[in-house]
Structures are given as C-alpha cells and as structure tokens.
Amino acid sequence: MRAAVRILGIDPGLRHTGWGVIEAEGARLSYVASGAIHPPTDGDLALRLRALHEGLAAVIATHEPDEAAVEETFVNRDPQSALKLGHARGVALVVPALAGVVVSEYSANLVKKTVVGAGHAEKAQIAMMVKVLLPRSDARSADAADALAVAICHAQHRGARNREAMLLRT
C-alpha cells in the first residue's frame, strides 16, 4: 500500500506569500494546514526577503513536507515590480530546496486549469473549488487558497512527472 505524500504549495509574493500543505494518497487528497506570510512592508527588500525565508523555513520545520510546488509568477506590470516579485519567488524555491525537499514549478494557468477546469479562473472560483476538493480546509485568505491550489495541481501532475523521469533514466 502506498504511503501518503505531504505536499507544500507556495504562492509567492513580496507582500503576501501563501502556503498550503496537503497529503495525497493516490487520488485522495487531505487538508493539513494553510496560511500566509506577511513580511513587513516598510523594511528594506533584504529584510522582507529574510522574513519570507524565516516564515517558509518555519512552515517546513512544522509540517515536514515530502515535496513542494511553487507557482510561476507572471507580472504584466513594470519591470521593477517583476524583479522584486522574482526575488520572492527565488526565496520560495530555495527554502524548500535547502531543506532537502524536491521542488516543482507550475504556471498559474495550469494551476487554474487543473483545479477549476479553466485557465483564466478568478480567485473566488479557485477558493470555491479548493473548498470542494478539500472540504476541511480553512484557507483564510486568497493567498492561502491559491497555495492550496498549487499543492492540488502538483498532486494531480506528480505521477506523470515521476513516470517521465523514470523513462528518462532508462
């Protein structure tokens, strides 16, 4: 019998980084925890990134995920905002990696399509479907719901990724 895999989903942001932890056993998904990290908005960029690092490290220490998934960010605003968001995303990628957790990345459209069925779903639709798929979840913010959606997406796609990796090794 296959053991459950604990998955950490991360929705990176410099103001709010959502996180969600689920367990996947075959097609069965279970809610574990979720929340958001809110770095200070008035500090230097380095201090804000440090707060993200410390917050994610605490989540990993508490919930001990086996795998992590991070949403790829797409910013259609000015280059400075995109660069700052990229820094937050870098922290979201490196903290699990430093803890020895395998990290996967998924585009926002794939996350939405996997969870809602449409690649351009609204945040309210995502939150509603997360609640349907994880009835015991209590995501208190859109960022936490988005992070749970990233974890759900990874749970749905990890089998195909694992099979692909095995094929490439042979």
Image (tube, rainbow, N blue to C red):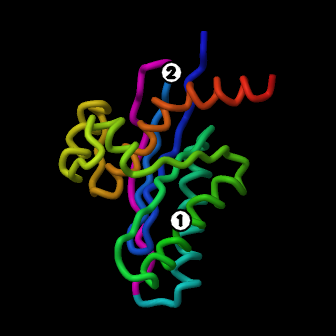
Of the two numbered discs 1 and 2 on the same chain, state the one appearing first in sequence. Answer: 2
On the rendered image, what quadrant is the N terminus found in?
top right
Q: Identify the amino acid type marked 1.
A: Arg
The disc placed on residue 25 is 2
In the rendered view, would you say 149 is above or below 166? below
Q: Residue at x 55, y 76 (%)?
A: 49
Q: How many marks?
A: 2
* 82 or 17: nearer the viewer: 82
Query: Which of 103/44 is in front?
Result: 103
Label 1: which secondary element = helix
Q: CA distance from mark 1 to mark 2?
A: 28 Å
User: Hey, what amino acid is under mark 2?
Assistant: Glu
Residue at image x 45%, y 76%?
Answer: 82
**For this view, does 1 lie left or right of residue 124?**
right
Residue 104: give its label.
Answer: none
Q: Residue at x 36, y 35 (%)?
A: 114
Residue placed at 19% from the left, 45% from the top? Answer: 125
Secondary structure category for the residue under label 2: strand
Q: Depth check: 48 or 63 in front?
A: 48
- Magenta residues, start to end: 25-41
Question: What is the crowding at mark 1: few (fewer than 14 residues within 10 Å), some, or many (at least 20)?
Answer: many
Task: Identify residue for label 1.
Answer: 89
Percent of width and height locating residue 152: 41, 36
Q: Residue 24: x and y, percent?
A: 49, 27
Could you tell me residue 104's position as x and y percent? 58, 45
> Does the magenta segment cover residue 36?
yes
Relative horizontal placement of residue 147, taking residue 57 as reference (left or right): left
Q: Main secondary structure of the magenta part?
A: strand
